[in-house]
Structure formats: structure tokens, C-alpha cells
Image (cartoon, rainbow, N blue to C red):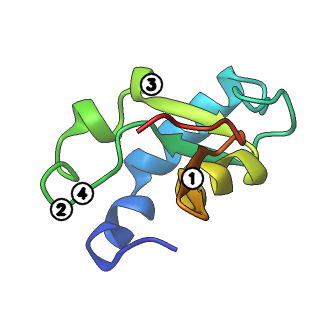
Amino acid sequence: MAHDYAKGFYTSKEWIECRTGYMQSQHYVCERCGGVASICHHKEYITPANISDPNITLNWERLEALCQTCHNIEHHTSNITVDGLTFDSKGNLIQK
């Protein structure tokens, strides 16, 4: 779900054309796992400070084709802590 400040951007003609072109260029293949990509992910998260910068928002070098699972991992499981131990999204122990 897009933040309120980004809703206009994500429905803009410029973004739709950029996203469609990029995903087609990647043949809808997830760049992380090789599965079917359904999301055009911004490598640099979109914020109120950079939403108007096309070098961030519309630059193919800053995009990544992701499947739903890899996108969920990116946004929802960056670091998992269990009993004082911290793990990355792939389950590797992170040394603190």
C-alpha cells in the first residue's frame, strides 16, 4: 500500500510507463530468486524528500523486478531478533 504522499506518483503516466518498460526488459523474472516478478521495486525507498526526483523514482538503475515473496522479505523481515540473537532475512546470524 502506497503512503499518502506517494499515491499520485504511483498512478502517474510516467511511473506506469517506466514500470511497464522495466518489467518487460527483465522479462518479468525476479532478480533475486528467478521466480515470476510482479512488483517493480525501488532499491532506494521513496520518501517525501525524494518523490519528485526522477533520478530516484524513474531511473531503471534504481529499480528491481521482484516476486511477491522477495518483496515481502525486503520490506517485512530485514532483521529478525530471537532470544537476543539477530538474523538477516536469509536466516544468517548477524554479529553485533
Disc on the earlier residue, 4 or 1: 4
Is disc 4 in contact with disc 2, using a CB cutoff of under 8 Å? Answer: yes
Q: Nearer the viewer, mark 2 or mark 1?
A: 1
| Residue holding disc 4 | 47
Disc on the earlier residue, 3 or 4: 4
Is disc 1 in contact with disc 3, using a CB cutoff of under 8 Å? Answer: no
Mark 3: give few (<14), some (14-19) or many (20+) Cα within 10 Å: some
Residue located 66% across and 57% down the image: 72
Work out which residue is located at the far left of the displayed protein and give it.
49
**Mark 4 residue type:** Thr
| Residue 87: image location, x then y, percent | 60, 46
In the displayed structure, does residue 24 sit left or right of residue 16? right
**Mark 3 residue type:** Trp
In the displayed structure, does residue 40 sit left or right of residue 11? right
Disc on the earlier residue, 1 or 3: 3
| Residue 86: image location, x then y, percent | 55, 50
| Image mark for residue 48 | 2
| Image mark for residue 85 | 1
Real-space Cα separation, disc 3 to disc 2, in angstroms: 20 Å
Real-space Cα separation, disc 4 to disc 2, in angstroms: 4 Å
Q: Quadrant of residue 36?
A: top right
Residue located 35% across and 39% down the image: 44
Mark 2: give few (<14), some (14-19) or many (20+) Cα within 10 Å: few
**Mark 2 residue type:** Pro
Quadrant (top left/top right/bottom left/bottom right) for the C terminus = top left
| Image mark for residue 60 | 3
Secondary element at tag 2 = loop
| Residue 82: image location, x then y, percent | 63, 62
Q: Nearer the viewer, mark 3 or mark 4?
A: 4
**Nearest to the observer: residue 84 or residue 90:** 84
